[in-house]
Image (tube, rainbow, N blue to C red):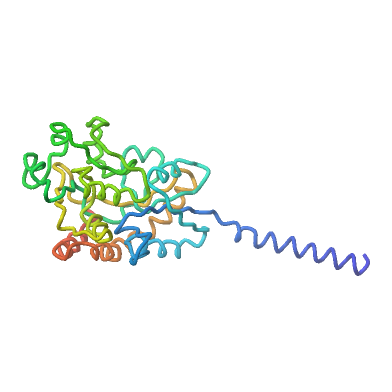
Amino acid sequence: MRAPCLLRWLTGLLGLLFALATGPVLAKERLLWLVRDLPPFTILEGAEKGQGVIDRLLPQLIAQMPEYEHDIVRVNRARGIQMLQDPRTLTCDPTLLWTPEREKFVHFSIPSLGVLSGGLLVRRQDQAVVAPYLLEQQVDLKRLLTDTQLKLGIVAERSYSAQVDAILRQLPDEAFSRHYGNDATASLLQMQERGRLKLVLGYRHEVSYLTGQQGGSKDDFLFYPILGVNRFQFLHVGCSDTPLGRQAVAHIDQLLPALRQNTLPEYYARWLDPEQRESYLEQSRHFFDTP
């Protein structure tokens, strides 16, 4: 074999060997992380952008999952649910509540963080509307919406926990004012401030953050826990219920125990009212105790 031909043959062989050796390393699965503006978990705008609880968690998960090509995608809740149902992509949401409906198409991680449950938000000037439906400062939400013509502002496709969702399913569709936008909760609060809505479903810490961003005061609102709903609910990472999604969750489940013991509760407690922080941190130490 002549020297030029031999050289070309060796060059081609070396190129083939290099491709075979590096191909599996370069061919990483693309993992889409779904985030939405959900303070204090994810904060996508403003001075505290990137300082939310999950904002701080995601880089730690990504750094410990180098086998994936990671992309963070901003969606609203309705779009996020659609993407989780698409088997063609590997999609994960780090802020999901477990529900029986979602379990049909989402593979859930172990619980990652216990958070205070949502409740009913009312302007202080409208507290008389709710007063007849209170029992030990918890609101009988079903009776309130059944007995009155008031509408409840909710974020479309958002779960407020399996317990709350079960209450909402017992009510007619006309009892709700649904918002589909990216800044849905903020928009609902603006509607409430303008008197277009009297009742909004949400979270105390979420309202504290959003009212501050809008130049208002959290003291303008009253928060009522919902009768029959547990004080705490638990976030999970949820991925597409596919072989790749289940594989990603298996890796995530190895990372979460260390993070959920101290790191994540501290991140979350920062956003609570000062009088709640110590109590929450004490209780969080026992969220995942084994019997």
275, 115: nearer the viewer: 275
Q: Quadrant of residue 278?
A: bottom left
Seen as rendered, the residue at the extreme bottom is 3
Q: Residue at x 31, y 47 (%)?
A: 97
289, 148: nearer the viewer: 148
In percent of width and height, residue 235 lies at 30, 52
Q: Residue at x 56, y 57 (%)?
A: 28
Seen as rendered, the residue at the extreme right is 2
102, 195: nearer the viewer: 195
In percent of width and height, residue 274 lies at 16, 66
In the picture, measured across the screen, residue 217 lies left or right of residue 104, that is left
Which quadrant, please, contains the N terminus? bottom right
224, 1: nearer the viewer: 224
The correct choice, above or below, for 194 with respect to 209 in the image is: above
The correct choice, above or below, for 107 with respect to 51 in the image is: above
Q: Residue at x 38, y 37 (%)?
A: 104
The correct choice, above or below, for 22 with respect to 156 in the image is: below
Q: Quadrant of residue 229?
A: top left
In percent of width and height, residue 51 lies at 34, 65
In percent of width and height, residue 183 lies at 34, 51
The correct choice, above or below, for 96 with respect to 284 in the image is: above
